[in-house]
Image (spheres, rainbow, N blue to C red):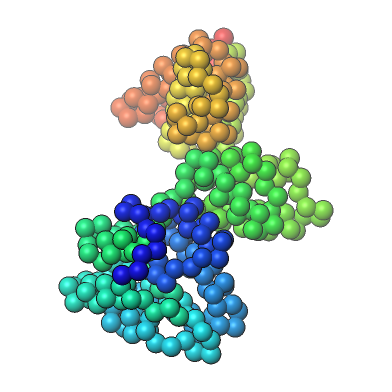
Amino acid sequence: MANWGGRSDGPDFASLRRELAAGSYRPVYLLAGEDTHRAASIVEYLVNKLLGASGSAFNSHVFDGEQAGCDRILQQARSYPMFGDRQVIWVKRAEHMVGDAASEQALQRYLADPVAATTLVMMSEKVDGRKSWVKACKSAGFHFEMAPPSGRDLVDWTVRRAKDKALPLALELAEMLVELVGDDLHALDGELDKLALIAAEAKGGLDEASLRAVILEQRAIDPFELVKQLGPGRQREGLAAFHRFLSEGRSAFELAPLLIWRVKQVAQVAALRAEGQPEKAVPGLLGITPFAARQSAETARAWGDATVERALRACHRCEAAMKSSPLEPEMILERAILDICAA
């Protein structure tokens, strides 16, 4: 079996991206992991690079591993390309194509001697590393871990995707978008599509301030907006923000977890700062984005230690009361806001 420099644990997406950018292509890829969004982008890249626009119509093949079966897929892999010198085969749910010993042995025989004119891409959200065909992929260097990006990698991915869509997204805005949307790549990509469309329709484009306003407008709730209105002696501002959310159709059951989550985050950041941890280290220590760390640090400084402690106690009471108190949830959350904003 040819060895392409694989490792037992499987290289990751970053190493695969560097390899493809250098123009190096393998005859077989097993893209294993939950990051199906980027795995699909790898297939798209291979089709465009290896086949081009004209060749993709004849020599790009997509199979479902459960429906097609191993014999049908390998038959196509061993066939000659049509009107070209290469073909790309994409197998979704590849774990289903090797459901018995015969198909597993057939696949292993192919892995030992893959067809040079064929690029076989098998994609699976979850593979059993104990299976012999998976071990064969790893030992031959065909196995790549497709774990979803997180932290700084997720922000960098967002910046790159924005650039691909001709959207001038600054690093801080990318951090904010990740914080508001979460780590779902499909959801993030959808938000970037919407932002790119809005920016393209705006006369003269959008500057950073305008783009920030659009991002916040597109999201249902800015999780920091309510927290920003709170603080010592700010009962009026806090209640006004709370009732504005209610008037927009938000419920106390939706707002309370957001408030509690953010207050706990502020308390964690304040504790790390009290320990002398540098601000740059906070995101990594807490597993949050730099945007969230900055927002929490600003709130902690504005509140002071006494208010942070009071807010944390108010949120603990609110959390317990929401589960057991006969009071209306709006009244419980309003009481928590008044406690946090005590002078």
Residue 241 percent location from the top left of the image: 59, 29
Residue 33 image-quadrant placement: bottom left
User: Which residue corresponds to the image point at 81% horizontal and 55% vertical from the top-left?
Assistant: 203
287 to 184, vertically: above or below:
above
Name the quadrant of the N terminus.
Answer: bottom left
Residue 66 percent location from the top left of the image: 29, 74
Query: Do we see residue 9 in this rendering?
Result: yes
User: Which residue corresponds to the image point at 26% horizontal and 72% vertical from the top-left?
Assistant: 108
The answer to which of 11 and 164 lies nearer the viewer is 11
Q: How many marks?
A: 0
The answer to which of 296 and 27 lies nearer the viewer is 27
The answer to which of 214 and 117 lies nearer the viewer is 117
Query: Do we see residue 338 in this rendering?
Result: no
Left-right relation of 203 to 50: right
94 to 275, vertically: above or below:
below
Residue lying farthest right? 204
User: Which residue corresponds to the image point at 36% horizontal and 76% vertical from the top-left?
Assistant: 114
